[in-house]
Image (cartoon, helix red, strand yellow):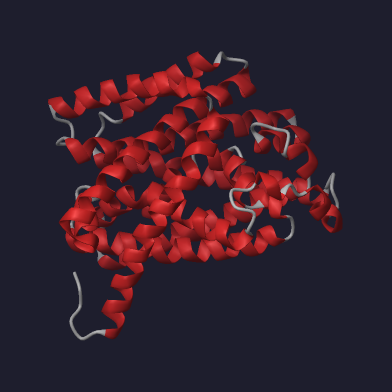
């Protein structure tokens, strides 16, 4: 269960918890968004499970070994470096998202909000891995509770009736304009974001079954959150499309106290994702907790802080669709391995 919560904690960062990811990839397809979410979630469950299993079998301490095992040294190295680059890029997006969240929620200047997040991530990444996993998993239940309340209120008190949501859907704001393709691409984004951490978490699992089950539980929680956030935003689609932080807008419509609570949880899940992505980035190039690890951590966060000034929404639009395609390539490799293990006499590692 802890693996499942930690997996969810890595995924539900700035783009997810604020509603921006769900809005861009799903909600603006109107009623078709539900079909898109179910399709995407099924893929997420399957490939997440395969990634954790592979990490367990290889006892991986980074994503490098699973990638090379699937694609060979030459192609694997190329994917490895691309993945590392984007992991770092998404971590930078988390710093930018923290700046936006601090400003929207508490009136704190974005530069200061990002700085606070940077310091928190730095301190956490000096802890040992098991403590990091515990930190990542702790916030997820609170996010589920808040999203459930917000979604339920908005679904039962909609500003936009369900039979009118398609009139407010802005398909031109979606990545491709095709709900099924954006669903698949989003599942690739989730896998690309979580693959490194899933590999490491899988290797740390006590049993093969624990690795599989943890990834599956995480996928189910992610689907539940996607459906809830999507339902709430569909009920307020006209306003959600104009908000930088749509879920915060929905919370404010329920009660100011709920908005405050969600703001805190949102910052915590942004922090979760930043930690969850920076750790595999660091361990790819250094030995965990060594002098080089600490130096790269400091330099990486400082450089990321500078990059965060580009802006949260702009960074989401640039990075996420491309990263999704990388994840789909990895998902293809995992699927081929699964098929080979199912239907051939000689099982792959």
Look at 22% across and 47% down and name the residue there.
62
Kindly tell me whether residue 272 is visible in this rendering. Answer: yes
Look at 54% across and 17% down and name the residue there.
110
Image coords of residue 302 (percent x, y) = 33, 19
Image coords of residue 112 (percent x, y) = 49, 14
The foreground one among 295 and 225 is 295
The foreground one among 33 and 181 is 181
> How many numbered circles does the render carry?
0
Q: Quadrant of residue 146?
A: top right
290 vs 225, left or right, is left
Q: Quadrant of residue 74?
A: bottom left
Look at 19% across and 48% down and name the residue there.
61
| On-image quarter of the C terminus | bottom left
Depicted 56 relative to depicted 243: above or below: below
Look at 59% across and 52% down and name the residue there.
176
Image coords of residue 71 (percent x, y) = 23, 61
Kindly tell me whether residue 232 is visible in this rendering. Answer: no
| On-image quarter of the N terminus | bottom left
Image coords of residue 139 (percent x, y) = 48, 40
């Amino acid at each position: 269960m802890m693996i499942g919560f930690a997996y969810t904690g890595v995924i539900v960062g700035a783009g997810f918890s604020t509603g921006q990811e769900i809005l861009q990839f799903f909600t603006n397809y109107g009623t078709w968004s539900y079909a898109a979410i179910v399709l995407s979630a099924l893929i997420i469950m399957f490939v997440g499970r395969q990634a954790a299993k592979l990490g367990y079998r290889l006892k991986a301490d980074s994503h490098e070994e699973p990638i090379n095992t699937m694609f060979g040294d030459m192609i694997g190295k190329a994917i490895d470096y691309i993945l590392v680059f984007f992991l770092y890029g998404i971590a930078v997006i988390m710093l930018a998202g923290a700046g936006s969240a601090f400003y929207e929620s508490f009136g704190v200047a974005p530069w200061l909000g990002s700085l606070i997040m940077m310091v928190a991530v730095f301190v956490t990444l000096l802890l040992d891995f098991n403590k990091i996993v515990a930190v990542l998993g702790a916030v997820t239940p609170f996010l589920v509770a808040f999203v459930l309340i917000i979604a339920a209120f908005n679904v039962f008190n909609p500003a936009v009736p369900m039979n009118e949501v398609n009139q407010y859907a802005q398909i031109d704001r979606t990545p491709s304009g095709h709900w099924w393709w954006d669903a698949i691409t989003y599942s690739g984004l989730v896998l690309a974001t979580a693959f490194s951490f899933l590999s490491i978490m899988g290797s740390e699992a006590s049993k093969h079954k624990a690795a599989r089950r943890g990834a599956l539980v995480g996928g189910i929680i992610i689907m539940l959150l996607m459906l809830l956030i999507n339902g709430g935003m569909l009920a307020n689609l006209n306003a959600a499309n104009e908000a930088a932080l749509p879920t915060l807008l929905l919370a404010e419509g329920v009660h100011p106290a709920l908005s405050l609570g969600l703001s805190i949880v949102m910052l915590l899940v942004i922090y979760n994702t930043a930690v969850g992505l920076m750790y595999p980035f660091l361990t790819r190039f250094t030995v965990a907790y060594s002098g080089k690890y600490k130096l790269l951590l400091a330099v990486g966060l400082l450089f990321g802080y500078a990059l965060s000034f580009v802006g949260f929404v702009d960074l989401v639009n640039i990075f996420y669709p491309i990263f999704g395609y990388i994840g789909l390539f990895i998902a293809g490799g995992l699927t081929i391995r699964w098929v080979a293990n199912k239907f051939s006499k000689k099982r792959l590692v």
